[in-house]
Image (spheres, rainbow, N blue to C red):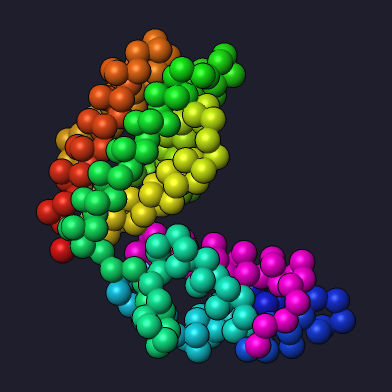
């Protein structure tokens, strides 16, 4: 079912609104359409279906997504704020480029922010925080890194559980602003992992790495938890860096 068909407004008038290239007062339906376009494009960029540096032409996206101009432009503006899309002067948009230098900057900045967020969470987190970490780690440990034969997991099950575990660790930091920045950097890191491919993880015991991070956090050993987390990221970085350019 097309995006426009899913969100057609009452009386069949909604499509006329979204196909109009000029701005119009925002409606709940328009917001829903923009959100769907944003999530679709964001997923396609992170998964590598839209390659780094590729032009994002409005006419082609309209055909690809079967929707109008306004929600596409709004979604592209949001993705520009997320640094997943770049504006090319006044000539349009493209998927953000990927490079070794950009990845190293991303890795360094992510380490800075998550170290502070993890230390604050360890200092402030209570029993609910601990339970959330344990539960999210258990769910993550039950799913193979690359799917396996259990079709009920789906292709994104590990990635979803992985995200939930990492943000459970940071969730008691007390700063929604910091968590928002961490989320943005996490998404950019996922894109680099997809670009590198599965071969970026040979003979690596990621479950043990997650176990070590969790145990140190539960022990309230901030130094050990931070070292385990940053070591986890450095190992990922050492695998990804040679495969980016």
Residue 62 x, y percent position in the rendering: 55, 84
- Residue drawn at 38 percent across, 72 percent down: 86
Give the mark count: 0
Residue 155 x, y percent position in the rendering: 43, 50
Residue 153 x, y percent position in the rendering: 48, 42
Residue 223 x, y percent position in the rendering: 29, 18
- Residue drawn at 69 percent across, 65 percent down: 32
- Residue drawn at 29 percent across, 55 percent down: 192
Residue 139 drawn in magenta: no
Residue 44 drawn in magenta: yes
**Vertical placement of 110 versus 78: above or below?**
above
Q: Which residues are magenta?
A: 22-48
Given residues 238 and 81, the one toward you in this image is 81
Given residues 146 and 70, the one toward you in this image is 70
In the rendered structure, the answer to whether residue 136 lies left or right of residue 235 reads right
In the rendered structure, the answer to whether residue 190 lies left or right of residue 82 reads left
Quadrant where the N terminus lies?
A: bottom right
Give the overall secondary structure of the magenta segment: helix
């Amino acid at each position: 079912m097309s995006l426009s068909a899913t969100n057609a407004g009452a009386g069949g008038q909604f499509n006329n609104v979204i196909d109009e290239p000029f701005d119009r007062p925002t409606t709940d339906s328009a917001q829903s359409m923009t959100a769907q376009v944003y999530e679709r494009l964001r997923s396609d960029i992170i998964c590598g279906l839209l390659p780094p540096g590729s032009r994002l032409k409005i006419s082609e996206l309209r055909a690809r997504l079967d929707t109008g101009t306004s929600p596409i432009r709004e979604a592209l503006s949001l993705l520009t704020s997320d640094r997943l899309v770049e504006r090319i002067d006044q000539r349009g948009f493209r998927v953000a480029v990927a490079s070794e230098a950009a990845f190293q900057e991303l890795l360094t900045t992510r380490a800075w922010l998550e170290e502070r967020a993890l230390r604050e969470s360890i200092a402030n987190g209570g029993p609910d925080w601990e339970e959330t970490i344990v539960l999210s780690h258990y769910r993550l440990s039950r799913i193979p890194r690359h799917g396996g034969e259990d079709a009920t997991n789906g292709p994104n099950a590990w990635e979803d559980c992985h995200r939930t575990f990492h943000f459970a660790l940071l969730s008691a930091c007390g700063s929604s602003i910091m968590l928002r920045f961490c989320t943005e950097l996490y998404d950019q890191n996922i894109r680099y992992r997809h670009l590198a491919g599965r071969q970026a993880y040979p003979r690596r015991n990621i479950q043990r790495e997650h176990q070590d991070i969790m145990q140190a956090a539960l022990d309230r050993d901030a130094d050990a938890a931070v070292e385990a987390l940053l070591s986890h990221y450095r190992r990922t970085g050492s695998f990804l860096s040679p495969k980016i350019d």
